[in-house]
Amino acid sequence: MPLVLAPDVLVNASVALGEAPQRVVDRLLTMGASETAVSPWVLERTEAMLRAVPTFKADAVGPHVAHISSLVTLVKPDGTFGPDAWQDALIATAKAAGADRILTDHPDLLEAGFVDDIEFVACESFLLEATMPPPPPAKMP
């Protein structure tokens, strides 16, 4: 099942090396683009946020976002969304990708939990879940 990455995870993975967002992105992007989806809105927000980080070189932002784009599946959800329409844009992205989970560390989104049967999941929770073994098979009668 594909997962959607929110812009905050992509930005934090780009600037907070060694932290949970970077570990999540590294893990997902090594799985292949078919497992990780973003929309043009996600890439636009990521670029805008990176441009606002004083320590991120301005001339590196475009190539960095292009590199991210090359590693994920780009989906085009219905509708247009403004810069502050995080929940609506991400839900639409998840629906376009056929995903039921969005990875984010945005506190407002995490507080929302489930919206339209799509779950907002924190990076730390995802990493913990990814390290858990699968449940044992059910016993046959």
Image (tube, helix red, strand yellow):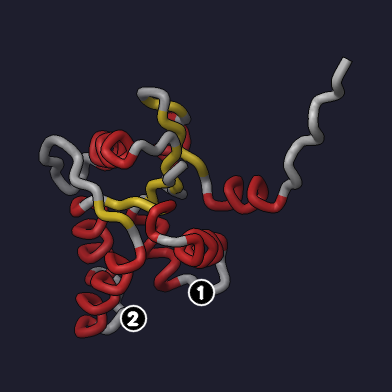
Q: Is residue 61 left or right of residue 72?
A: left
Q: Which mark is residue 87?
A: none
Q: In the rendered image of this protein, does residue 85 appear above or below residue 30?
A: above
Residue 100: x and y, percent?
Answer: 43, 34
Q: Residue at x 50, y 41 (%)?
A: 121
In this figure, which residue is indicated by the disc labeled 1?
17
From the image, state whether disc 2 or disc 1 is nearer to you.
Answer: 1
Q: Residue at x 27, y 61 (%)?
A: 46
Pointer 1: residues within 10 angstroms few (<14), some, or many (20+)? Answer: few
Q: Residue at x 15, y 36 (%)?
A: 78
Residue 34: x and y, percent?
Answer: 39, 54
Count of labels in the image? 2
- Of the residues shown, which amino acid type is indicated by label 2? Thr
Q: Is residue 18 left or right of residue 72?
A: right
Pointer 2: residues within 10 angstroms few (<14), some, or many (20+)? Answer: few
In this figure, which residue is indicated by the disc labeled 2?
55
Nearer the observer, 78 or 42: 78
- Of the residues shown, which amino acid type is indicated by label 1? Leu
Spatial separation of the CA atoms under disc 2 and disc 1: 13 Å
Residue 42: x and y, percent?
Answer: 26, 53
